[in-house]
Image (cartoon, grey):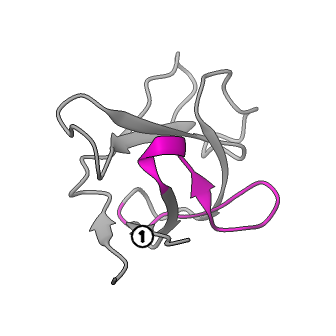
Amino acid sequence: MARRVWSLAELKAKWIPVPKPRYNAGFSFLCPIHDQKAHRLVIILVNPYDGGKPVDEPGVRAMMVHNGGLGSITLMTPTGGHAFDFGACGLYAIIDGHVEELLN
């Protein structure tokens, strides 16, 4: 079975709202496998664009490796891996603006 890949644009990624002057501290995108009209997966950046501390919101924690915006963002886990576990939604890597399904 081939791995599936989606662009963050296809999954309607958007920055999470944070109080100003904070910005781009995390983002959400539609779950690739569940009801895409309401179910979003959330990633909180441990090194947000604005240089501040991570926001205190629920979500998977990630470190930005490449920050050219959501269209080209690459993430790593805080421990240095690329696999983000979203529980029942699956295991994914986010590289160059794409969400890649990781198979066990």
Relative to 77, is 53 above or below?
above
Q: What stretch is highlighted in magenta?
A: 71-90
Q: Residue at x 40, y 56 (%)?
A: 70
Q: Is residue 29 left or right of residue 48?
A: left
Q: In this view, does 96 lie to the left or right of 63?
A: left
Residue for badge 1: 100
Q: In which quarter of the image is residue 54?
A: top right
Asked whether residue 78 is drawn in magenta, I would say yes
Q: Which residue lies furthest to the left in this view?
A: 37
Q: Quadrant of residue 69?
A: bottom left
User: Residue 100's x, y, as percent?
Assistant: 42, 70
User: Residue 31's x, y, as percent?
Assistant: 33, 45
Tell me the amino acid under the disc marked 1. Answer: Glu
How busy is the neighbourhood of tag 1: few (under 14 within 10 Å), some, or many (20 plus)?
some
Q: Which residue is drawn at 78% across and 54% down?
A: 78
Q: Residue at x 45, y 73 (%)?
A: 96
Relative to 102, is 8 above or below?
above
User: Residue 76's x, y, as percent?
Assistant: 67, 63
Q: Is the magenta stretch mostly helix, strand or loop?
A: loop
Q: Is mark 1 on a helix, strand or loop?
A: strand
